[in-house]
Amino acid sequence: MIISHKHRFIFIKTQKTASTSVEIALSKFCGEHDIISSVHTDEKIRKKLGYRGPQNIRVPFSKYSKLDWLEFIYTRKRTVFYDHMAASDIMRFVDVDVWNSYYKFCFERNPYDKIISWYYWTRHLHKQNTVKEFIETGMGSKIRGFNLYTIDSIPVVDKIYKYEEMEESLKHIGDVLGLDTPIELPLERAKSHTRKDRRRYTEVLSESEAEWVSKIFAREIRYLNYDY
């Protein structure tokens, strides 16, 4: 997640959409006052490239709600801007004119493909043996996407780019922001080591599994015109 005052944009980081790589790429253009969330284990990639890492992540006390204050008093921990932060929370913690005037964008991915990527990402953590087991345990429905860039099921970003159209999307972002050099994803792709099976989702999902995806991700499929 990035809030760039230098280039007046807010990047909302969804899951399994190459958003970590996109954040790293966008970090190249950030200034000292911009808010940049951590990409955790992939910080080594950003550091190797010499781009700005996590900075300015503490939410100002002036933006705290009563609940935020109670949590701070109880835990003594500051509220921070974090990687997969929802638009509703970002909007709460930035000035109204920032939210209204900055270019807000994110990426989404065909849910049938995204669920396979999510399966391989969580497999080493939870040891599901098959996609069927992954779905039956409820892990498949935990991937965050639609609720990150919507409020009350209504998109609140200016543009939802498609993972499948990455190259042209990055060019469009650069044009909108007026960047003087192209946005280039790092050659060392974040989290790329977790998936070995590169078959198309139609070769992996059974008919019943595809139907499950259609129901769980119906909003994304309908809004972005994805199909199986």
Image (cartoon, rainbow, N blue to C red):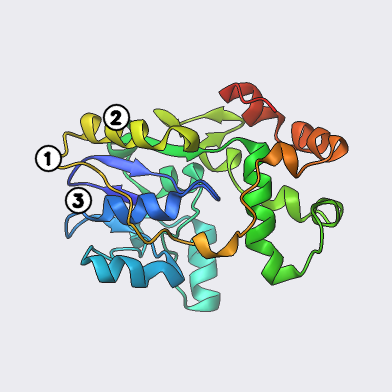
Residue 59 image offset from top left, x and y in percent: 37, 60
Q: Amino acid at mark 3?
A: Phe
Q: Amino acid at mark 2?
A: His
Q: Amino acid at mark 1?
A: Asp
Q: Secondary structure at mark 2?
A: helix
Mark toward the start of the polypeptide (1 vs 3) = 3
For the residues labelled 1 and 3, say whether their Cβ atoms are less than 8 Å apart: no
- Using a 10 Å C-alpha cutoff, classify the residue at mark 3 as few (fewer than 14 neighbours), some (14 to 19) or many (20 or more): some
For the residues labelled 1 and 2, say whether their Cβ atoms are less than 8 Å apart: no
Residue 208 visible within the image: yes
In the displayed structure, 59 sits above or below 124; it is above
In the displayed structure, 216 sits above or below 64; it is above
- Camera-near label (3 vs 2) is 2
Residue holding disc 1: 180
Residue 106 image offset from top left, x and y in percent: 43, 39
Q: What separation in Å lies between label 1 and label 2 (alpha carbons)? A: 13 Å
Q: Secondary structure at mark 3?
A: loop
